[in-house]
Image (spheres, grey):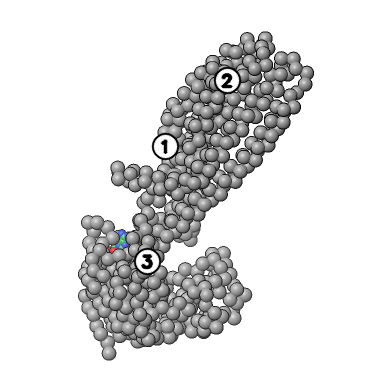
Amino acid sequence: MKADKKMLKSWVRQQNRANRPATMMMALMGMFNVLVGMVLIWSLATILAEWLTGGDRINRYYLLLFILSSVVRVILGYGQELLAMSSGEKARKRLRRELLARFFAQGPALLRHQHSAALAAMLTDRVEALEGYFSRWLPASALWVVAQWSVVLVVFWQNHRAGLILGGCCLFLPVFQAVFGIATAIASRRQILALNRLQVRFLDRIRGIATIVLSGSAEKDAQGLGRAADELRQRTMKVLRIAFLTSASTDVAMIVALVWIVVDQRHGLLHAGSIPQVTSILFAVLMVPEAFAPFRALSAAYQDRAQITNSGEAIQRLPNLPEWAKNEASAHPVPQRKAQGITLDVQGVSYRWVENRPLALDNVSFHLDAGDVALLTGSSGAGKSTLIEMLLGFIRPSQGKVLLGGIDLQDMRPADVTRQISWIGQKPVIFAGTLRDNILFASPDASEEQLQAALEASSVMAYLPHLPDGLDTKLGEGGFGLSGGQAQRIAIARAFLKDAPLLIMDEPTAHLDPATEQEILVSLRDLLKGRTALISTHSSQFHKIGETKRLVIKKGQITAEEVLS
Ligand SMILES: Nc1ncnc2c1ncn2[C@@H]1O[C@H](COP(=O)(O)OP(=O)(O)OP(=O)(O)O)[C@@H](O)[C@H]1O
């Protein structure tokens, strides 16, 4: 727990450091704004004082100063807004990049630990919610003490008694900050957790829409969602109540300071003393809101500060970017492809998903020559998917190693590992976009000829003429629907285009009817030429694919290895 807090603090510090130049720039502009504000109020106070003491003409020098400083303040305010926006934007981009790198480095293993709605919310809402932290909280927290006490000192310099009253009232502000700050942090943490629960629930319900409707529990489920939404509403109201109380207590302190100064110095005002005396009283009165403004900006951003802790905790729960994924820049060996494919050596690898649970892979070893096609079979839970995730580089063996073309995966750059491997799963992911985008996804630079060849080889050509807009037909959610076999052909076309020497397949025909399976097998047979392949399957039809090896896995161990001639 203590270690978690320490890590969170160090992560927040790292974020602050990354944003420091922008924060300092915004704080400097803010300070300059406060100084210009002093000039503006001083000129206004002098104009008013001359008028109150019976002057019949407005002093043109102070009027000009007043107009000039007003214009400068407007420009500075605008500049601060622009800078705040761009700094928030940059910080969010940086965080999203960092998160995506961590997501991609973990691959599908991540979804075994975290709900996809929570991950999606992390990338969108949680990062979005940090905008205020970078654009408001950091500059406000860097500025408020200096800005506030500069105002108090200048007032004191002009008018000792007023300065002391103002300073006294300002001393209460840190007390408000401590009390309401803790309450805001707790309330907004609860609000975020309620929001997260609602998001996860929503996504689950949308995914399971058919099950819910067919089991007749739509109404009960809607009530459950209603309760979750109500919980979120209550928590949001609590955050707003605390924000209102913080703002109200700052207002009370400001009004007390204002009334106190006016009552204390009423004599000078009512009996219109000398111009300098009235100017100094008016200056002190008009400066009161200026003295409280930095704290007001800080307390308005207090909720933003709570967000960094909430988001930081969620981000900290993500596995860290593995060391090897950070090594993109340094020199690493690249395996050599042979005409028939590439060699794959799995040497005594073990892996355990959760402590105190049996090993998911227990000292697994096998060797595939370039051009070998191995079928991996085993009952459910035997460890096939775990082995495949390891070969794809998403999880690392706790013991043993995986060599591709004679080179340890751990010594290779992640980009070089992915270049060597094509993967076809049970159900290919079809992204929202055109058929062309979906096929070119893994090889965006492929030429039109290469694309046409992949369309032919994967038999996408067989159904292409039936699509409304051919290659430009929109697919994915809300787009044209494809059958399981048609979608799987897209995955095969992607693999043809990528032209990697190692093919890994995880039950590629699991969801297909026997006739479609036969058609897919024909395309797969072509794809296997000149490549090494490991195919996990329960289907008896794969014996026609031209396999050279059969591996049987049971309880994480290879229990049989058959070499076919
Ligand atoms: N995230 C996880 N946390 C804990 N245990 C896990 C996790 N993922 C997998 N396991 C366990 O690891 C073992 C191997 O699982 P794996 O998914 O590799 O089996 P499989 O052979 O691919 O099964 P199937 O054919 O049903 O997909 C199982 O006992 C499973 O319960």
Q: Nearer the viewer, residue 246 or 376?
A: 246
How would you rate the neighbour count of disc 3 (Cα within 10 Å): few for under 14, some for 14-19, many for 20 or more?
A: few
Mark nearer the viewer, 3 or 2: 2
**Residue 40 screen position, x and y as percent:** 65, 29
Mark 1 vs 2, N-terminal side: 2
Q: Which residue is mark 3?
A: 330
**Residue 531 screen position, x and y as percent:** 38, 82
Q: Nearer the viewer, residue 500 or 353?
A: 500
Which residue lies most toward the right here? 56
What residue is rendered at 26% in x and 62% in y?
352
Q: CA distance from mark 1 to mark 2?
A: 42 Å
**Residue 176 screen position, x and y as percent:** 46, 27
How would you rate the neighbour count of disc 1 (Cα within 10 Å): few for under 14, some for 14-19, many for 20 or more?
A: some
Q: Which residue is mark 2?
A: 158
The secondary structure type at the circle numbered 2 is helix
The secondary structure type at the circle numbered 1 is helix
Q: Which residue is mark 1?
A: 186
What residue is rendered at 22% in x and 61% in y?
358
Above/below status of 494 relative to 113: below
**Three-letter amino acid code at the position of disc 2:** Gln
**Three-letter amino acid code at the position of disc 3:** Ser
Q: Is residue 274 visible?
A: yes
Q: In the picture, residue 254 is in which quadrant?
A: top right
Mark nearer the viewer, 1 or 2: 2
Q: Is residue 63 left or right of residue 517?
A: right
Q: Nearer the viewer, residue 241 or 322?
A: 322
Q: CA distance from mark 3 to mark 2?
A: 62 Å
Mark 1 vs 3, N-terminal side: 1
What residue is rendered at 70% in x and 21% in y?
48
**Residue 517 screen position, x and y as percent:** 42, 80
